[in-house]
Image (cartoon, helix red, strand yellow):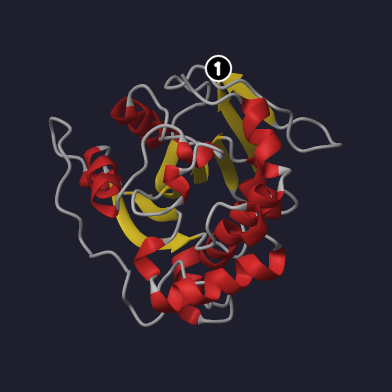
Amino acid sequence: MRTDALEIDRFYRSVRGRAARDMALRRLTALWPQARGLDMLGYGFAGAYLEPYRGEARRTVAYMPAAQGAVGWPKGAASLTALGEEARLPFKEAMFDRIVLAHALEEAEDLRRLLRELWRVAAPEGRIVVIAAHRAGLWARSEATPFGHGRPFSKRQLTDLLTGALFEPVAWSRALYAPPWRWACGPKTASAFESAGERVAPAFGGLILAEAIKHVGAVRPGGDAVRVRRSALEGAARPALSPHSRPSDPAAKDRAS
């Protein structure tokens, strides 16, 4: 049973929820600095992560599975929210250039079926970002937040899931190093924890982020995934999900295109 959408919404209006959103958005907007003319889908409870792109993307849709329920998004404007079956999306094939998953995989009934359905609606060479609870982080151990419900993930587990669904993982990062305690999640305190965690314990963020690409050429007759053509970018001098990337950097532009 999924965590209720109203409970997740209350979380994102709390101090801890704002810290989680802000720390994850630092990574996401460094990776995708703009979405001009693109069609974007948020799956799960992803409206908070679509907000930076709403004004420039050609289309933004926040899709929420029925078992979770829905909360209108965006606030104070015409709704861009859709509610429906978990793994049967009411969208045509190859419709979305970018897909953001948040509070999506941890409590899904059938992970592989869901990811294959997302593969169907992703455009060729379309990109997805998974934002999920990290198995090694403290947030997965706290039931006081939505990240403490369902299954957390390691890098290896997400790699197996994504490649099994015919996505190619290309970049990894972690975020949210502040512990899941209210006093540690104020804007200044959370930023201090984030800075220290990135330097001292980069493998122990509360959230794990993975970017993957839909390569239609990666499908063999029979539907098996082939070996990916390049390794993940974690550990590179300028990792794709690093908050230090800048749109002016040619490499960052290539990754975002």
- Left or right of 5 in this view: 165: left
Q: Is residue 59 above or below residue 232?
A: above
- Left or right of 243 in this view: 169: left
Task: Report the number of discs.
Answer: 1
Q: Can residue 20 be seen in this view?
A: yes
SS label for mark 1: loop
> Which residue is the site of mark 1?
66
Q: Which residue is drawn at 49% across and 27% down?
A: 92
Give the x, y percent position of residue 191.
62, 70
Give the x, y percent position of residue 217.
24, 47
Task: Look at label 1 and name its amino acid.
Answer: Ala
Q: In this view, does 250 lie above or below 204?
A: below
Q: Which residue is drawn at 75% across and 51% down?
A: 55
Report the front residue among 127 and 181. Answer: 181
Q: Residue at x 40, y 54 (%)?
A: 137
Q: Is residue 227 above or below residue 223?
A: below
Q: In this view, does 203 lie above or below 56?
A: below
Q: Can residue 257 be seen in this view?
A: no
